[in-house]
Image (cartoon, rainbow, N blue to C red):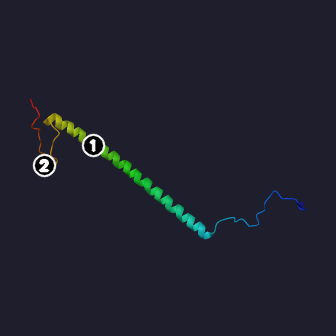
Amino acid sequence: MAKRKTPKSDRIIDLKPKADQITEKQLERLQALVKVINKNQNDLGVLETRKHVILHGILEYQDGLAMMQKEFQEQYGTTNINIIDGKISHDEGQDNS
């Protein structure tokens, strides 16, 4: 086998020039995508905040309803009240003595 006359290089030289930045069109597309993602994430945050506020409101109303039910139980002996006309329904099998 013949010996090499030139020494083997340990480095590989890339003859292709490296770009310093992306094209203007790519930059515009990239910025547009990031802008849409950021807007959607912001919108989602706003919705989650509104959801949180609404859930707290529901809890307050449920607490108010529980207090009224306690009052009805003490005053009328039942919480079975028609919310349309306010009629109280006493269970037939209930002992009122």
The one of 65 and 90 positioned closer to us in this rendering: 90
- Residue 27 sits in quarter: bottom right
Residue 71 % position (x, y): 19, 36
Residue at image location 42% in from the left, 54% down from the top: 46
What is the residue that sits farthest to the top in this orientation? 97
Quadrant where the N terminus is found in the figure:
bottom right
Question: Of all residues shown, which one is farthest toward the front?
Answer: 1
The three-letter code of the residue at mark 2 reads Asp
Q: Position of residue 13 (x, y in %)?
A: 78, 62
The location of residue 97, given as percent across then percent down, is 9, 29
User: At numbered mark 1, what does the secondary structure look like: helix, strand or loop?
Assistant: helix
Q: Residue at x 56, y 67 (%)?
A: 29
Residue pointed to by mark 1: 62
Which kind of residue does numbered mark 1 sit on? Gln
Pick whichever, 40 or 93, lies toward us. 93
Q: Which mark is residue 85?
A: 2
Q: Identify the residue at image location x=20%, y=39%.
A: 69
Crowd around label 1: few <14 · some 14–19 · many ≥20 (10 Å) = few
Of residues 23 and 12, the one nearer the viewer is 12
